Image (cartoon, rainbow, N blue to C red):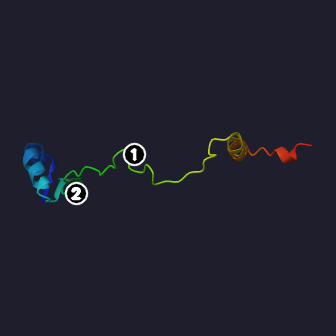
Amino acid sequence: MQVNMLEAKNRLSTLIVAAERDEEVVIARNGVPVAKIVKYIAPKVAAPGIWKGLSAYATDWDSAETNHEIEQLFTGFNDASIT
């Protein structure tokens, strides 16, 4: 269904009910479609901790050596270049 702005202002509740019934509601200005009212569908969000135990990681992920390697990747600094 397509309605113009003034009609949409006056019939907003009715248009929302139509959108809830999966009807397409298009609002037009001077006969040109400019907006659409659609039914809101809440996003599906996974519960916190759902990945717990499903991802493997190295036991040395927080070692001094690993941290130094990561620092070199970010800074581009290489100890071997020092003479």
Image quadrant occupied by the N terminus: bottom left
| Residue at image location 45% in from the left, 51% down from the top | 53
Picture coordinates of residue 73, whole percent (x, y): 70, 47
> Which quarter of the picture shows residue 49?
top left
* Residue extending furthest toward the top: 64
Crowd class of label 2 (few under 14; some 14 to 19; many from 20; radius 10 Å): few
Q: In this view, does 36 lie to the left or right of 63?
A: left
> Which quarter of the picture shows residue 18?
bottom left
Residue 83 versus residue 7: which sits nearer the camera?
83
Q: In this view, does 61 lie to the left or right of 6?
A: right
Amino acid type of the residue tagged 2 in the rendering: Val
Residue 29 versus residue 80: which sits nearer the camera?
80
Disc marking residue 31: none
Local SS, label 1? loop
Q: In this view, does 58 lie to the left or right of 64?
A: left
Residue 41 versus residue 50: which sits nearer the camera?
50
Disc marking residue 49: 1
Are discs 1 and 2 less than 8 Å apart at CB? Answer: no
Picture coordinates of residue 27, whole percent (x, y): 18, 53
Residue designated by label 2 = 32
Crowd class of label 1 (few under 14; some 14 to 19; many from 20; radius 10 Å): few
Asked if residue 28 shows in the view, the reply is: yes
**Mark 1 or mark 2: whose residue is earlier in sequence:** 2
